[in-house]
Amino acid sequence: MADTLNLDISDLTPEEVGRVLALVRSMRDESVPHAESTDDSSWAEAASTGWTLDLVLVLREMLRRRGNDVQLEAFNQAIRNGGEISREDIFRIGNYEPKRQLKNWTKPLRTITSELVERGSLPEDAEFPMEADYTEGSGYRQAHLFRVAPEIVKIVKEAMCDDCWKLVDTGTKGRNVPPHARLERVGNFRQFGGSGMVADEQDYHCTACGKDWMHETGNSGMGWVETSH
Ligand SMILES: [Zn+2]
């Protein structure tokens, strides 16, 4: 198979070229093999220990605000996989040196959980949102995968479709992430800005899961913003 492709883009607008590039990028991301993409839907049977969709939102927001972007992305990706994410995927997300250890890597999530318990939002015996799974054996063992609490996977999967879940926490990079196939435009495209600062807006509604979004593009847009959950 050829590994280059020449396209005549002379008839395309810059926006259309951007969409072609975004599509190629997303196909490339999807073709990266995931060692642990074994979603057996066992999360569907999970019993609740106190987590709610609002608390998952708070958890994500706190991770983002504290700069724990790798934990946040790994958490989101694990949920997309049905709950698990491999050590290799985490190293790829974080661009970590091969020698790095993942000791205490879930600490930010544990800290936030304790804070939620302290303020009375979560029961004391609520499950930890993400835990390491260690290889069998004795002595020093390294975590070979991380697992999100099944009840959280269930809450998220029931609240929105996988395509919408891919848009959450994309941050300002989301400006260049095109709407997925099940998103329908709501209302008109709104143009904002001038003097070099542009934040255009378009509202969307997901026909698969009912979620509402606002997509802000332009160099000062916020990307994909959840307007319902
Ligand atoms: Zn959706």
Image: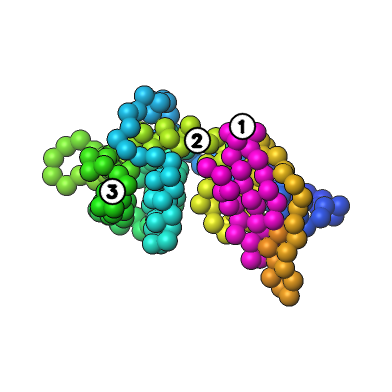
Q: Is 144 on the left or on the right of 171, as rendered? A: left
Residue 208's disc number: 1
Q: Which residue is mark 3?
A: 120
What's under tag 3, amino acid-wise? Gly
Between residue 58 and residue 18, name the one nearer to us.
58
92 vs 153: above or below = below
Task: Give the mark count.
Answer: 3
- Range shown magenta: 201-229
Q: Residue furthest right?
A: 11
Furthest-front residue in view?
Answer: 120
Query: Dot 2, how many residues are within 10 Å of its Cα: few (below 14), some (14-19), or many (20+)?
Result: some
Classify 10 Å Cα crowding around label 3: few (below 14), some (14-19), many (20 and above).
few
Where, quadrant-wise, is the N terminus in this rendering? top right
Residue 46 placed where, x, y %? Answer: 34, 28
- Count neighbours of disc 1 (C-alpha within 10 A) and say few if under 14, some if 14 to 19, many if 20 or more: some
Where in the figure is residue 90, as x and y percent of width and height?
Answer: 39, 49
Q: Position of residue 215 (x, y in %)?
A: 65, 52
Classify mark 1 as within 8 Å of ligand 1 or not, answering yes or no: yes
What's under tag 2, amino acid-wise?
Answer: Ala
First-in-chain label (2 vs 3): 3
Please tell me which residue lies in front, 167 or 152: 152
Q: Is residue 79 left or right of residue 204?
A: left
Which residue is pictured at 72% across the width and 68% down the height? 193
Q: Nearer the viewer, mark 2 or mark 3?
A: 3
Residue named by callout 2: 159
Q: Which one is nearer the viewer's eye here, 156 or 29? A: 156
Residue 140 seen from this side: yes
Find residue 146 and report its horizontal and vertical position in percent. Answer: 33, 42
Extreme left residue here? Answer: 139
Per the model, the C-alpha gap separating discs 2 and 3 is 24 Å
